Amino acid sequence: MNPGTAEEETFMLPVGTSTIGRTKDNQIVCMHKSLSRKHAQLDYDGKRVRIADLQSKNGIYFNGKRVPACEILEGDTFRCGDITFLVEGATTRSPRISVGAQTLPSPLALDASMSKRVTKVPPPAVLDDDQRYKDKLFLLIRASELLVGEQPLERMLDELVVLAVQVLEVDRIALLALDDKTLQMKPRVIKTFVGAAPRPYSKRVIDWVVDKGSPTSFADVSRDRTLPGDPKEDASIKSAMAVPINPGGGTVGVLYADSVSQADAFRPDDLALFRALANMAAVAMDSHALRRGSEKP
């Protein structure tokens, strides 16, 4: 992936069995929250490469579908959690499995969910601002390309959320949309990198944003008494930010992210990025509604 650039990382695949996961006892180590400790197993017999899911939480995906196992060939990509790997030279004696760092997918690929999606390396204590802005600019360029594609709405919204995960340090992120029947905000896309919770977002924050109709961030939700509802519901949540999705006729959704471990985690430029992504989601949802309306007799 990203051949010839500093972002490329390549693993030689020996004959026999190798594993992919977060911990150092794997042959292919990728320390990302979306991967399990032992996520997948690769078997190479000298001719063919086969991958199998090791009962991971977030699974393996091939051709846009979650699969328990499959055979992969030279040039194929597969995804473990939110990380995409590329098989190079599978017809040679030792094929390579490549994964990049600090790069983003090409949403204009034949299958955007299977494009070379990778994530950033854990940031240093003091993150270089220039690199932050470059990463976010690149994200916006990639996200804008989604709008000119012909992907289904659910795929497009999922890709927007995955892009955000790659440049923002979040524990949970969700895109909620208005249910036409109940008129309540219902989750459409959820990504969580922490333990199970009764609800993977703060309803108090969602209600506040829907009521006010404006983007905002909260330094410490667990201590915020200005939000509606019972603060005990959010005792485990520190930072949060949320932006209404409004195509012009009212709020039809909310883009939400939080950190359960760090207070005051989000910067103004993080919120600005969120606003841009929410606007793109609004355009996508509005276009989908218009197309659906034009298809009715």
Image (cartoon, rainbow, N blue to C red):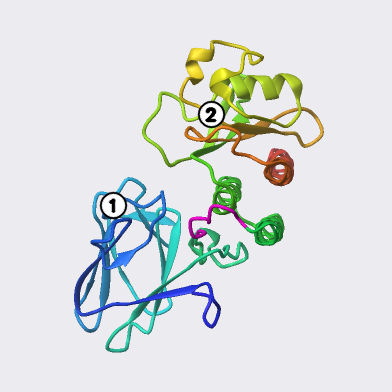
Residue hosting label 2: 238
Q: Secondary structure at mark 1?
A: loop
Q: Nearer the viewer, residue 33 or 281?
A: 33
**Answer yes or no: do the residues labelled 1 and 2 have beta carbons within 8 Å?**
no
Q: Which residues are magenta?
A: 119-127
Specify whether residue 181 is in view: no
Q: Residue at x 54, y 24 (%)?
A: 202
Amino acid at the residue labelled 1: Arg
Q: Is residue 122 magenta?
A: yes
**Left or right placement of residue 37 versus residue 99 in this view:** left
Q: Residue at x 77, y 27 (%)?
A: 250
Q: Nearer the viewer, residue 214 or 122?
A: 122
CA–CA distance between discs 1 and 2? 26 Å
Dominant secondary structure of the residues highlighted in magenta in the image: loop
Q: Secondary structure at mark 2?
A: loop
For the C terminus, the image quarter is top right
Sort mark 2 into few (<14), some (14-19) or many (20+) by Cα contacts within 10 Å: many
Q: Residue at x 28, y 61 (%)?
A: 24
Percent position of residue 21, x then y: 31, 58
